[in-house]
Image (cartoon, grey):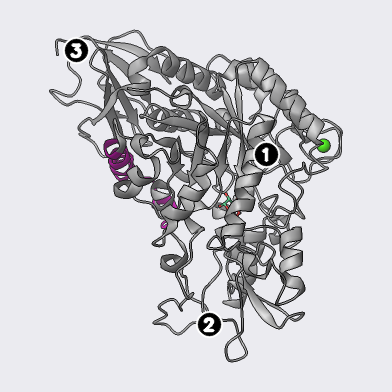
Amino acid sequence: MTRHWWQDAVVYQIYPRSFMDSNGDGIGDLPGILSKLDYLQWLGVDTLWLCPIHPSPNDDNGYDISDYQDILAEFGTLADFDALLAEVHRRGMRLILDLVINHTSDQHPWFLESRSSRDNPKRDWYFWRDGRNGGPPNNWESIFKGPAWEYDPHTDQYFLHLFTRRQPDLNWDNPAVRAAISDLVRWWLARGVDGFRIDAITHLKKAPGLPDAPNPEGLPQAPAYALHMNVNGILDHLDALCAAFAGRELLTVGEANGITADEAEAWVGFARRRLSMILHFEHWHLWSNAPEAPLEPRALQAIFGRWQQALDGRGWNALYLENHDLPRVVSRWGDPGQYRAQSASALATACFLLQGTPFIYQGQELGMVNTRFDSLDAFDDVFARNRIAELRAAGLSDAAILQQLALTARDNSRTPMPWRDAPQAGFTTGRAWLAPNPDYPEINVERQLSEPDSVLHYFRRLLALRREEPALRFGAYQPLPQPDPQFLAYLRDDGDERLAIVCNLGRQAADYHHPTALPAPATLLLGNYPRCGHPDWIRFQPYEARVFRLESER
Ligand code: GLC
Ligand code: CA
């Protein structure tokens, strides 16, 4: 079987605005990233994914791009980028960019031309339509709330935006759009990047005719996912994009809301030669459908297991619990109080030892928790601000809105990286663009480097183990029985070795005893609690995770 470098890779996601500021303006930048490569290499990650670094009015923090072939001045220059890439490569590491091509900024020259007149050659690069009965052309709701259409008085038409009004959607049905995107992809490949994370890729195709969404409640706008996500014909657009990747060993990972495990092989099957992997949303929705409910480990394992079994030997998974769009996983599914460190390391063990490529989001390796918001003014994210307007219009009190957003807002994971117990968490000598998480005196890199039992050191051991044990990279996944619903447990078996991963993801100590599940003798390879000397591996403390090698006869 052919093996690809990205199957051995561990990806570290950087939110450049919040990683490290090198010049005191309060905004993270490319030289700041360069200055932290020793740390990242020590941790054991080898591939960096940078969230968008291009010129942007920052309506959606860089996900609204106004020039694909340059660097946002706040982050540095193309020369800074080349220097970073060269140093990453010199260390045997790799770097991928965020490719945001479902939409551009409203300040991108393509859109400025498109909006200039109804007969501009680029008019059809975006979706322009006449209004209907004095309102938008259809009833679609934007993913970021409000109508998905913005009126432009200059030409008396509306344009489509699935995200913010400053992110007009590109019309991928237009071959000139596809060609322009292929050109910029090739331009970055010629510069030496090792791949791309492709933003919002399942939205590239819209239902022909842009029909209304079903709207039984008669609201002004209705969610329209079925009409703009994973719509018939999407794979043709995907193929057009993948043609620009052909012939290279790239890591390409699509952000793929709406794709199920059954459909995954079409997107990432080895034989199809489309993407390397996708970031699916099924476990994300387990949380977002019930943000206040405690984790049900069984439900999480059911989702993980479906994807493991669907792709084993046929394609490859991307493994993640956090990103810049999600609150911190310890606050969502762990215990941010008493068992912060244990829940951070147990959740990481449960997810990152599955078959696939781990994606660690900056700060996750410290077991960071959600930040605190004193007032509604503390939210920076455009999505949060839209939600505030929507919830106020629905009559909620500011206190109730604050409570809801504190739990769900994307700002939670976008606070500056806490490097040290120093002003501004050691992130900047100036004033950070977004206040650091007030926990930084306790939760920071410097402190955890000095503590061998820290979450940080545990992540390093976890990644080292994954590197050392082929079964953890390539072995097949088999679920282990869950005698108690608090457990998430599985085997990885590559024919030579069998490793058992057993995680108690609950706040109570519990026994993992199943007569056939873990035949002794087993050797403990990794655990997130200090061993107390006796060989009883039945009893698991709260959020205890252990990895065993099974020595028994097969
Ligand atoms: C993706 C990004 C998110 C962004 C959106 C629009 O979901 O991860 O941060 O807001 O696309 O580009
Ligand atoms: Ca800076």
Mark 1 or mark 3, earlier in chain: 1
291 part of magenta stretch: yes
Does the beta carbon of the residue at mark 1 sit less than 8 Å from ligand 1? no
* Span of residues in magenta: 286-310
Q: Which residue is mark 1?
A: 187
Tag 3 residue: 520
Q: Is residue 461 above or below residue 388?
A: above
Counting other residues with Cα less than 10 Å from the Cα at mark 1, is it few (<14), some (14-19), or many (20 or more)?
some
Query: Is 509 positioned to the left or the right of 449 in the image?
Result: left
Of the pair 534 and 116, the residue shown nearer to us? 116
Q: Secondary structure at mark 1?
A: helix
Give, as a three-letter code, the residue at label 1.
Answer: Trp
Q: Earlier in the sequence, mark 2 or mark 1?
A: 1
Residue 19 horizontal/vertical position (percent): 70, 34
Find residue 186 and report its image quarter: top right
Image quadrant where one finds the N terminus: top left
* Quadrant of the displayed image that contains ligand 2: top right
Residue shown at the point (36%, 12%) measured from the top left: 525
